[in-house]
Amino acid sequence: MSSPPTTSVKLQDLRDLTLDEAYAFAEGRGLPRFRGEQIFRWVHARGVKSIDEMTDLGKRLRAELAEVAEVRTLDIDLVQVSTDGTRKLRLRTRDDRMLESVLIPDGDASAPDDDLEIDAATESVAPHLAHALFPKRPKLTLCVSSQVGCALDCKFCATAKLGFGRNLTAGEIVDQVYRADALMQGLDADDPTRRAGADHITNLVFMGMGEPLHNYANVVRALTILTEDRGIGFGKRRITVSTAGLVPAIEKLAAENLGVNLAVSLNATTDEVRDHIMPINKKWNIARLLEAVRKFPLERRRRVTFEYVLLDGVNDTVDDAKRLGRLVRGIPSKINVIPWNPHELSDFRRPTDGAVRAFQAELREQGLAVYVRKSRGVDIDAACGQLAARAPQLIQLR
């Protein structure tokens, strides 16, 4: 007589639950509501990796929870260390998918300018005096991935060459933060990154693999988890979500008014050029994109970031800079100019230093806040547009 077939129970990933969902999970198991908060705190404030570590839950309760739930974590498959201190983490999911996150120490231009948020009483002080009164704090920015691969096919981006694998869950998104922070805590005190004073992640930028707003529900859930005070309570103003231009999702994000920063990967000043390098423009052109951006709610002294990847002979002329200034006029914004970071998956060329300076000078002449982003981690394929979770000759995890 054959044995009856066994059925596998899909376990709930506790890392994936918002606080409200943790409450509902507990109550759905016949537990008091406060148990949901206990579970949430253990998973997100204390960063446990298993239910068995939740020591203020009785042994019997932990055993019962283990029958229906688990705490899933990403495995750090590999770490590369750049000569400039940038660290790229290659992470492995439960289903053997690969993704990458990047730890960028101090000075990343894509991070929100919190050091410029000075008290109203000092607003009339000259900028150099304001910085003397309020010195710049060390930053450690984590560039977070939202998908395995990407579906948007931006021609200059290495991630696009992978195609689309799948969306990351909210739990996988937030666990990138926890794995990276745990890595930082394990470094020696004399490590260059630690010596710079940045021993905890201070800023998050959703600019890694994938289009964050293409994975809208999981990204918003991850933001809700990360900013919950009963978890790690990450500051909303220190989180930036970047998009290639999914207009309906930008409008939806605006309506939710989550208080995070918005960055828009613009990269062209005419629809003809943007259609070619960013096919998403054929669906939502520049005018439609900027219309949505103009309506995005901004708190006092907050700005939208426009990211502009400079491609030699494609979008890097002074005329392009003049058009860019006209396009963004009236939008509280800053422009991050990013000279293209080479990789073997594309045949674009990096612009000359002279072209970069002329582009920046024209925008400044128009009174715009414009910064040339210093590429970090180029030697380990960790810079903007280089993430592809490949397996080159890597520096193994210590």
Image: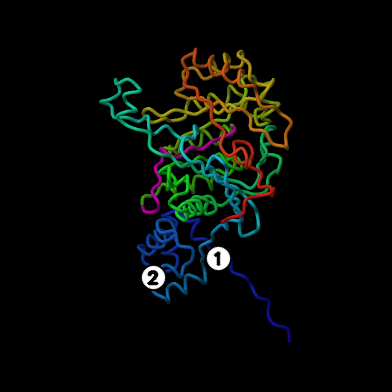
Task: In the rendered structure, find residue 238 and report the number of the disc placed on it.
Answer: none
What residue span does the magenta drawing correspond to? Answer: 230-244
Residue annotated with mark 1: 11
Q: Which residue is denoted by mark 2 in the rendering?
A: 57
Given this view, does label 1 or label 2 mark the residue nearer the observer?
A: 2
The magenta stretch spans residue 341: no
| Residue at x-position 49% and y-position 35% | 108
The reply to whether the magenta stretch includes residue 243 is yes
Q: Compared to 112, does 192 lie above or below?
A: below
Which residue is situated farthest in the front direction here?
Answer: 190
- Say if 61 sits above or below 184 in the image: below
Task: Please state if 92 lies on the left or on the right of 110 as rendered.
Answer: right
Q: In the rendered view, does 138 fall on the left or right side of 83?
A: left
Amino acid of disc 1: Leu
Which secondary structure, mark 1?
Answer: loop
| Residue 53 percent coordinates (x, y) | 44, 68
> Which residue of the protein is positioned furthest toward the left in this rendering?
121
346, above or below 123, in the image: below
Q: In this rendered view, identify the residue nearer to me: 386 or 276.
A: 386
Question: Which residue shows up at 40% across the image and 51% down it?
Answer: 232
Residue 167 rendering spot, x and y as whole percentages: 61, 48
Badge 1 crowding class, 10 Å Cα cut-off, few under 14, some 14 to 19, many 20 or more, is some
- Asked which secondary structure carries label 2, the reply is loop
